[in-house]
């Protein structure tokens, strides 16, 4: 099911709420191991995303491939070449499995939406980080 999203920044600022927040879904051993969520969790997350869209606050939501498909680019010193390190990366507590970007009226509203999100990992390992986006 394709959902229409608010992505035009000019429209968002004129008719939007006022504050952007990102719900950052932290990776786990399961998400890094390519273990798919249960059908029940997929249904719960679909309902949650539909609620966000219906309320007019969801800007974008995406999942990320595991770190084994990614790389890190480190900048050692000014003027030196960046260093590329292929994944996977061992420290799952620092990795991101996905994100949801919301446009809300206040930090409190962002917290309320974050608390409504089902456990994103579904194995009692779920953790999200809520951060305001600079505009």
Image (cartoon, helix red, strand yellow):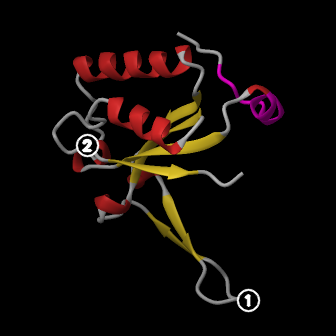
Q: Residues within 10 Å of mark 1 (few under 14, many from 20)?
A: few
Residue 76 rendering spot, x and y as whole percentages: 58, 86
Q: Which secondary structure dominates the residues rendered in magenta?
A: helix
Q: Nearer the viewer, residue 71 or 51?
A: 51
Residue 83, compared with residue 63, is above or below; it is: below
Residue 70 image label? none
Is 106 in the magenta?
A: no
Labels 2, 1: front one: 2
Q: Tell me what residue is drawn at x 48 percent, y 35 percent.
A: 109
Compared with 131, 99 (above or below) is: above
Instruction: Examine the image and state in which quarter residue 46 appears.
Output: top left
Q: Position of residue 23 (x, y in %)?
A: 46, 43
User: Residue 40: percent from the left, percent from the top?
Assistant: 23, 17
Q: Earlier in the sequence, mark 2 or mark 1?
A: 1
Disc 2/disc 1 C-alpha distance (Å): 40 Å
Residue 117 showing in the rendered view: no
* 9 is within the stretch colored magenta: yes
Q: Is residue 98 visible?
A: yes
> Foreground: 51 or 2?
51
From which residue to which does the magenta span run?
5-14
Query: Which residue is rendered at x = 26% and y = 43% of the image?
Result: 126
- The circle on residue 126 is 2
On the image, which quarter does residue 125 sit in?
top left
| Residue 4 located left or right of residue 100 | right
Q: Nearer the viewer, residue 109 or 129?
A: 109
Q: Residue at x 46, y 17 (%)?
A: 51
Q: Check disc 1 and report its element: helix, strand or loop.
A: loop
Extreme residue in the top direction: 1
Left/right placement of residue 69 relative to residue 127 reads: right
Residue tagged by mark 1?
79
């Amino acid at each position: 099911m394709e959902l229409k999203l608010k992505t035009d920044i000019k429209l968002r600022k004129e008719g939007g709420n006022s504050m952007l927040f990102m719900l950052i879904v932290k990776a786990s051993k399961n998400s890094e191991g390519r273990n798919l969520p249960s059908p029940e969790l997929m249904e719960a997350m679909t309902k949650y995303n539909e609620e966000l869209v219906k309320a007019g606050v969801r800007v974008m939501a995406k999942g990320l491939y595991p770190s084994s498909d990614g790389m890190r680019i480190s900048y050692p010193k000014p003027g030196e070449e960046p260093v590329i390190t292929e994944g996977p990366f061992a420290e799952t507590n620092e990795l991101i499995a996905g994100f949801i970007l919301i446009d809300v009226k206040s930090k409190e509203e962002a917290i309320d939406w974050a608390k409504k999100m089902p456990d994103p990992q579904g194995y009692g390992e779920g953790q999200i980080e809520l951060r305001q986006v600079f505009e």
